[in-house]
Image (cartoon, rainbow, N blue to C red):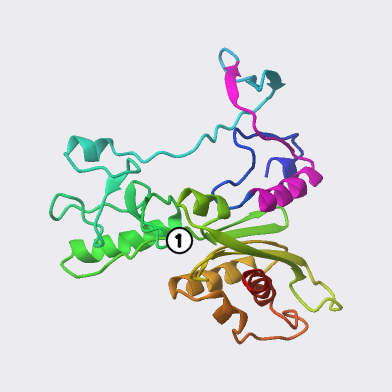
Amino acid sequence: ALKERGLKVTVVEMLPQILPAMLDLDMANIVKEILEQKGLSILTEKRVEEILGEDKATGVIAGEEQLNADILLSAFGVRANTKLASEANIELGETRAIKTNARMETNIKDIFAAGDCAEVPNLITHKPSCSQLGTIAVRQGKVAGTNAGGGYSLFQGVLGSAVTKLFDTEVGSTGLTVNAAKKARIETVTGTINSKTRADYYPGAKPIKIKLVVEKESHHLIGAQIIGGEEVTQRINAISFAIQKHMTISELAKADTAYAPPLSETWEPIILAAEIVLRKLQ
């Protein structure tokens, strides 16, 4: 938004890549290149060491380099606000968010938690997680509200499905990245494909890149990352459904998909990515 208003924009990222919660390094570098082509300056592996200025911020020191600025936006991450819960002796979990059961109930009967402060299990690793997304918060709130009102509802867990749009590029992910899988000691095989959102010869066809992440032994689909000009959200949603139904990569490769030149390629790119994984597993 700032760039489109004519401002010179520099992004300083402490980690080796942008969008680390959504993408692996190879996919993140593609997004980084797209943003740089749009005129953004992106500095990775640079820690903001000091904010300069007296009455207002005039710049930062990052990686021993001074970056002067008229506007400074601080986005150093989000932490669960558990002050009220701690004062009420409500138990916190491994992520330091509020520990809940499947009914979104805390350790104190009839006290519920939902949203960015609540800890819930990851559907793949089954370990506690705190995915601070609006889509997750509203589902948790529905479960907590139902139970608080005397009904019965369960929250099964999260995949952390997310999408965003940067200029004219859509970026989405669901499940585990390869990096997240490694941290959970899950061995993976991946398949990546470059394709188009419509028949290649049809006007308006836009590029799309899909990466699938598969658990090596069970062949279950456990994650996906997509970068494209359009139709990213619904593909992420479809893959999320597949992961939740414990679909194997061979089942995905045989899925029945639709085709019409103005709307899609003959071969759905997800299917082609699945076939690449299958060849690696053979």
Along the horizontal axis of the image, is 232 left or right of 194? left
Looking at the image, the residue that sits furthest to the top is: 54
Q: Is residue 147 left or right of residue 188?
A: left
Depth check: 264 or 22 in front? 22
Q: Which residue is mark 1?
A: 159
Q: Amino acid at mark 1?
A: Leu
| Residue 91 picture location, percent across and down | 21, 43
- Could you tell me which quadrant the N terminus lies in? top right
On the image, the x and y values in percent for residue 246 come to 45, 74
Residue 211 visible in the current orientation: no
Residue furthest left in the image: 109
- Image mark count: 1
Question: In the image, which residues are magenta?
Answer: 25-52
Residue 120 image position (x, y, % from top left): 33, 55
Q: Residues within 10 Å of mark 1 (few under 14, many from 20)?
A: many
Residue closest to the eye, 211 or 100: 211
Can residue 29 be found in the magenta stretch?
yes
